[in-house]
Image (tube, helix red, strand yellow):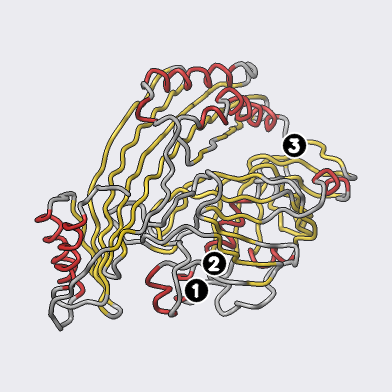
Amino acid sequence: MTNLIETPVLERTLQAALRAGGDFAEVFGEDRRGSSGRFDDGRVEELTSGRSRGAGIRVVRGDTTGFAHTADLSATGLVEAAEAAAAAARTGGGGVREIALEARPSTPYEPEIAPESVPKARKVELLRVADAAARGEGGAIRSVTASFADSRRRIVVANSDGLLTGDEQVRTRFGVQTVAAGDTGMQTGYEAPGRTLGFEFFDQFDVEEIARKSARRAITMLDAQPAPSGSLTVVLAKGAGSVLFHEACGHGLEADLVQRAASVFEGKRGEQVASPLVTLVDQGAYAREWGTFAIDDEGHPAQRNVLIENGVLNDYMWDYLRARKEGRASSGNGRRESYQVLPMVRMTNTYLEPGTTDPDDIVRDTEHGIYCVQLGGGQVDTATGDFVFGITEAYMIEHGKITHPIRAAQLIGNGPEILHRIDVVGNDFDTWTGMCGKNGQSVPVSSGQPTLRVTGITVGGTAA
């Protein structure tokens, strides 16, 4: 349990928050430290470290929420913030509510090697190694940018229900972006794994291999041919379509969007919304993935939530307020970017469970289509499920074999529709690491999927 704020101070702050009336009050304390670096074309362009520390206090009265935050963690500073939040929520009433906090233990992850204990020179050396490895893939590589980031985030959560708990989250990420030049112009490659790990992250991930993978991707795409267009069968390699399912399906299963009638999945619990081969899970404590934690930012334990089971919509993701409105428990999906903002419903580690088919058989059984290895950015309308995603690495499948690379392709479709069109699911699996933006807040997430085939997605290409 973190002792970021002493228990008597938390109790006094909650009492102040509810002194003028209120249904619920919460103190969220946070202490975040981190460092980052960027090595750009042979030079250290950025080497930073920083710390932010403070508390956010919210008071709920009926349908009104008052919120205030402060960097002053003294008893006086917290009480003043509590009174400001209470004033924002107050519509009348009054009285005093006594609160006795009961500690709920969590099991925070303690890294084997604390990132802050590693000298910056060692981290810069990793960047140099990655730069050299990427350039070693050939003269076509014209530009290399390598970067690292690590953070340690301590939180404490106390609320007027008597909850008192805390967590420590340590994360490390390393990325390499490369640019290759050839007769067809410039092509880019990118690779950036991240995990909820300390510096032992580098025992699992070889920075030279990360760099080579990025460089090979850029070089391969120099020989790519213009992509075809039209409705095509698409085989998504393991991990390749994860961001698509995160954006086009996952967001639509967040309870705040459902309650605002802004989700295509609204009112469909118990209905068949996907192929029977599809089981979609969100799991906050999944291995040491990038979106992993012991408790969410409202103090609820991370849990495994089966959203779609064998194609049937089983449940949505919930934070405290949305769950309370429905008279049910939170699913542990209340997250916030920092103590300066309110929590909202967010994904954690979201993935499609593997099937039973050998991935090589999926390709062999595909007469004509696209083999997609990596997606780029995209846009999604959660109210309809419609999406557009760019493809950064893909190949043609011809007569059951992967042939030449293709470029300048987009996937255009509808999330719920492609869930129905998945006709085979592989027995492999991989994940994608990213930062999920929603209402101006960004939080770490991962998503994953096995190799799978979709029997028809509109491909936007440039081939004549």
Query: What's under tag 1, amino acid-wise?
Result: Val
The structure residue drawn at horizontal position 77% and vertical position 47%, both measured from the top left corner, is: 370
- How many numbered marks, from 0 up? 3
Q: Are marks 3 and 2 in contact (CB under 8 Å)?
A: no
Q: Tell me which label, 2 or 1, sits earlier in the chain.
A: 2
Q: Is residue 38 above or below residue 156?
A: above
Kindly indicate whether the residue at mark 1 contacts the one at mark 2 (C-beta within 8 angstroms): yes
Q: Residue at x 27, y 73 (%)?
A: 24
Residue 440 percent coordinates (x, y): 37, 56
Residue 458 located left or right of residue 121: right
Is residue 462 in view from this perspective?
no
Front: mark 1 or 3:
1
Q: Which residue is mark 3?
A: 405
**Is 175 left or right of 53, judged from the image as shown?**
right
Measure the C-alpha gap from mark 3 to mark 2: 32 Å
Mark 2 — residue? 252
Residue 117: name its quadrant: top left
Q: Nearer the viewer, residue 350 or 374?
A: 350
Report helix, strand or loop for mark 1. Answer: helix
Residue 376: percent from left, percent from top: 58, 45
- Label 2 residue SS: helix
455 vs 243, left or right, is: right
Residue 289 shows which numbered tag? none
In the rendered image, the vertical position of residue 273 relative to residue 238, given as above or below: below
Query: Could you tell which of marks 1 and 3 lies nearer the N-terminus?
Result: 1
Residue holding disc 1: 258
Answer few, some or many: residues within 10 Å of disc 3's Cα (few below 14, many 20 plus, some between 14 and 19). many
Q: Closest to the observer: 19 or 36?
A: 19
